[in-house]
């Protein structure tokens, strides 16, 4: 219990420090949502990370920090790393067999997302950023410069 309280205090301190530096970048993007809702979604993801939870439907936003090679084993996925306002990083694995690729994606781009969080030791990953052809899973998406990819 003491560890969770300490983690929450450290997380809050991180928001205060990183949030001010990050706010200027987010405010430049007209698609950015309010800082308060960004912090709320970051808190949900941070809690899932701290508790090693997976299979949680989340929405959030971040800045692309690294572009990775596509994963072509099985269904093809466009992969990249984003940094949340909290400082946490996430791998985005966007299925490009079921949704359009973001061809013009660059480091520094602002991305909004809705998908399923999966825990890993590096911060976690977001997948299911597309519609489920079977209709059994919540439909996810990515959004860049007002255009939605789903």
Image (spheres, grey):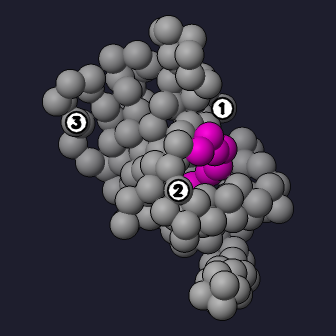
Q: Residue furthest front?
A: 1
Q: Position of residue 11 (x, y in %)?
A: 65, 80
- Dominant SS of magenta comes to strand
Residue 59 included in the magenta stretch of the image: yes
Asked whether 147 or 120 is in front, the reply is 120
The residue beneath circle 2 is 53
Disc 1 element: loop
Separation of marks 1 and 3 at Cα, in angstroms:
26 Å
Question: How crowded is the residue under tag 2: few (<14 C-alpha within 10 Å), some, or many (20+)?
Answer: some
Count the marks: how many? 3
Please give the name of the residue rendered at 33% of the width and 42% of the height, measured from the top-left corner: 79
- Mark 1 and mark 2 lie on one chain; the one further toward the N terminus is 2
The residue beneath circle 1 is 146
Q: Quadrant of the N terminus?
A: bottom right
Looking at the rendering, the stretch of residues picked out in magenta corresponds to 56-64
The residue beneath circle 3 is 71
- Above or below residue 89? Residue 111 is above
Side of 119 where 84 appears, left or right: right
Separation of marks 1 and 2 at Cα, in angstroms:
30 Å
Side of 72 where 140 appears, left or right: right
Please give the name of the residue rendered at 62% of the width and 51% of the height, measured from the top-left corner: 61
Disc 2 element: loop
- Above or below residue 55? Residue 16 is below
Can you see residue 31? Answer: yes
Asked whether 27 or 115 is in front, the reply is 115
Side of 83 where 23 appears, left or right: right
């Amino acid at each position: 219990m003491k560890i969770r309280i300490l983690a929450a205090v450290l997380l809050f301190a991180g928001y205060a420090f990183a949030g001010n530096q990050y706010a200027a970048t987010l405010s430049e993007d007209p698609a950015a949502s309010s800082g308060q809702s960004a912090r709320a979604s970051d808190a949900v993801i941070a809690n899932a990370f701290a508790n090693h939870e997976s299979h949680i439907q989340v929405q959030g936003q971040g800045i692309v920090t690294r572009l990775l090679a596509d994963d072509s084993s099985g269904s093809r996925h466009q992969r990249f790393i984003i940094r949340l306002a909290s400082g946490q990083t996430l791998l985005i694995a966007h299925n490009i067999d079921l949704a359009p690729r973001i061809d013009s994606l660059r480091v520094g781009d602002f991305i909004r997302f809705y998908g399923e969080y999966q825990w890993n030791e590096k911060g976690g990953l977001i997948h299911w950023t597309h519609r489920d052809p079977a209709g059994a899973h919540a439909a996810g998406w990515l959004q860049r410069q007002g255009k939605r990819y789903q």
